[in-house]
Image (cartoon, rainbow, N blue to C red):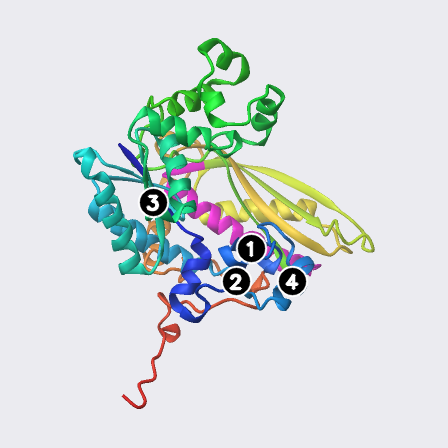
Amino acid sequence: MIGLIDCNNFFVSCERVFIPKIRRKPVAVLSNNDGCIVALSNEAKALGLRRGDPYFKVQHICERNDVTVFSGNHRLYGDMSSRVMAILASIVPEIEIYSIDEAFISFDGFSEDKLPDIGRDIVSRIRRSTGIPTSLGIAPTKTLAKVAARFAKKYPGYKAVCMIADDEQRRKALTLTPVGDIWGIGRRLRKKFELSGIDRAIQFADLSDTQVARLVNITGIRTWRELNGCPCIEMEDCPPAKRQICCSRSFGEMLSDFDSLRQAISLFATIASRKLREQHSAAVSVSVFLHTNAFREDLPQYCNSGHRRLSEASSDTIAITKTAVECLQSVFRKGYLYKKAGIIITEIVDENAVRRSLFTDEADRLRRQRLMSVLDSINACSISHDTVHMASYSPVDALTRSERKSRLYTTRLKDIISINCHGL
């Protein structure tokens, strides 16, 4: 059996751990630059607020209903996620971290009739150790575990743990589940199903082999098999290496000068290079894009992208940053206010498969490789990943607007909560 542990309203729950007075009250968390709502408490959803709402359009609703609004504090959320995953890893034999607030867990070796009790113990231990409420779905396949987790979160009667153990439970769960809510079924496929009169997951699961082959591709067939209890998606010890890495950001204030954009691109190149090294990869292709604010029709508009290739595939921060800045120089134009910029790394290969150039100085390459290794080792001890960094960029917080950000309660000493004990 496979379980899916899902942290309930994760960003909101992280804020509530350290500010108890906002529990059971409406809470919203905003995206970069405080632009859109990305997370909501159940109380905020009841007011009609939705994820993706531009904050300026719903600000009056938030103020009228005393909604507590936070800027996204992703360093805090990342650290709390690590704590949840560490607890899971200490209990179960195998864990696959799917996202910042979700993980698949293997129940191999556990007695099936004891799984509900074991699941409730897991949920209880996470809540007791971190303060984060979670829901757990248990089923024979990953896709069904996702379905079960939705029921565990939605219906209090399950006490945070829902298990699909037999065919009767499977069919009942799929009958109550819209086909568009199934993991792996996107918007385009959902519309295709609607045209075929399929709106419930059970209708999709009950199709014949021939009907499924006409409707969906190989990924859809795999989902169909999973819904019928046939495991097709294996547990992964680590996520597959990315074939493309993109780092970008909308700026809190529009930028007009080259130096400010160069600092931003240098930061993005540093992040992309670190991600390459983390997955033991290298890349040869670097692209940079930038554009103005399309919503400001009163301003002149411009967008463009530049592309360069390295002499050989690399994950070296210095080499990638230099190439990215060259790309920026080729597309930057004076006289515009730029709202967003980014870097895209492509043509990614395994670091052991890199073809070395005949003109490469091997001694210099090894020195740079050791430098990157030392840099990563030092920064691994820092939640910000930039204790040691290129002098050519500004801290990420300087690029964004975060007027409502909470403190780094778990990672910065000066932000640790102080408790007044007067009168005790």
Dot 3 surroundings within 10 Å: few (below 14), some, or many (20 or more)?
A: some
Q: From the image, which quarter does the C terminus lie in?
A: bottom left
Q: Is residue 328 magenta?
A: no
| Left or right of 133 in this view: 72 | right
Q: From the image, which quarter does the N terminus lie in?
A: top left
Q: Amino acid at mark 1?
A: Ala
Q: Label 4, label 2: how many angstroms apart (C-alpha)?
A: 11 Å
Which residue corresponds to mark 1?
46
| Left or right of 198 in this view: 3 | left
Q: Earlier in the sequence, mark 2 or mark 3?
A: 2
Numbered label attached to residue 158: 3
Q: Amino acid at mark 2?
A: Pro
Report the mark closest to the observer, 2 or 3: 3
- Which percent across, then down, holds residue 76? 41, 61
Residue 384 in sight in this render: no
Task: Tell me whether circle 4 and circle 2 mark residues in contact (CB < 8 Å).
Answer: no
Task: Tell me whether circle 2 and circle 1 mark residues in contact (CB < 8 Å).
Answer: yes
* Residue depicted at x 45% and y 46%: 273
Count of numbered circles on the image: 4
Dot 1 surroundings within 10 Å: few (below 14), some, or many (20 or more)?
A: few
**In this orientation, which residue lies closer to the viewer: 219 or 110?**
110
- Looking at the rendering, the stretch of residues picked out in magenta corresponds to 254-282
| Left or right of 21 in this view: 87 | left
**In this orientation, which residue lies closer to the viewer: 32 or 202?**
202
Q: Earlier in the sequence, mark 1 or mark 4?
A: 1
Q: Label 2, label 1: how many angstroms apart (C-alpha)?
A: 9 Å
Q: Label 1, label 4: how many angstroms apart (C-alpha)?
A: 12 Å
Which residue corresponds to mark 2?
26
Q: Amino acid at mark 3?
A: Tyr
Q: Earlier in the sequence, mark 1 or mark 3?
A: 1
Numbered label attached to residue 61: 4
